[in-house]
Image (cartoon, rainbow, N blue to C red):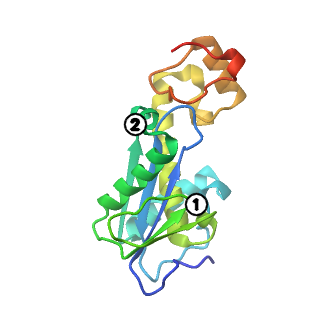
Amino acid sequence: MLPLKIHAHLLECGTDEAGRGCLAGPVTAAAVLLPDDFEHPWLTDSKQLSEKKRSELRPIIEHQALSFAVVHVMMEEIDRLNILNASILAMHRCIDGLSKSPEFIAVDGNRFKQYENIPHECVIKGDGKYLHIAAASILAKTYRDEFMEKIHEEYPAYDWKNNKGYPTSQHREALKKHGTSPYHRKSFRLLPKQLNFNF
């Protein structure tokens, strides 16, 4: 079982994002405050879990969390800010959305910007090291996947239901054939340079 958080004595939130490397759709972040007695044998990095287990864990996390928030930052803001800044903004907005203000913020990854006057620590692969970051990774991943499945109905040619906006060969082939959709990130290199097209 992973440890719950970095500082046992503090009200500490975990935060993580999903969709940073995608060509389409939002970057989605979650922040989670878990109670000190929270435990679950499955809970680990969302990428290590099946879609079914993530779906089963999501309502457990939501029901037992002291507070949680999930935020999408959409393509226009990603293009304007760049993906790193958009990811950090999404995490800040999640923390804004918590009903209780944390005393410490545990961040998955290696980059973050100071949030108000609350201390934080960046933890590389933190979603596999602490339960609250793992919980945030599951919420971010499941909410983002849900969004991509919904817009798949609108633009089925890109197969977002299966690739979730990541640059698979099928997704790139669809870009060559159909061009971009309103959900594509225009600031990203959507195709290798020799195949680029004008937007």
- Residue 83 visible in the snapshot: yes
For disc 2, the marked residue is 77
User: Dot 1, crowdedness within 10 Å: few (<14), some or many (≥20)?
Assistant: few
Three-letter amino acid code at the position of disc 1: Asn
For disc 1, the marked residue is 110
Of residues 91 and 98, which is closer to you in this image?
A: 91
| Residue at the extreme left of the image, as rendered | 99
| Residue at the extreme bottom of the image, as rendered | 9
**Taking 150 as reference, is 63 above or below it?**
below
> Of helix, strand and loop, which one carries label 2?
helix
Q: Residue 60 appears at what percent x and percent y?
A: 46, 65
Of residues 147 and 13, which is closer to you in this image?
A: 13
Q: Residue 93 appears at what percent x and percent y?
A: 35, 54
- Residue 44 visible in the snapshot: no
Disc number for residue 93: none
Q: Residue 121 appears at what percent x and percent y?
A: 51, 70
- Measured in 3D between alpha carbons, the distance from the residue under mark 2 to the one under mark 1, in whole angstroms, is 21 Å
Q: Residue 61 appears at what percent x and percent y?
A: 45, 65
First in sequence: mark 2 vs mark 1: 2
Instruction: Indicate the quadrant containing the N terminus: top left, top right, bottom left or bottom right.
Output: bottom right
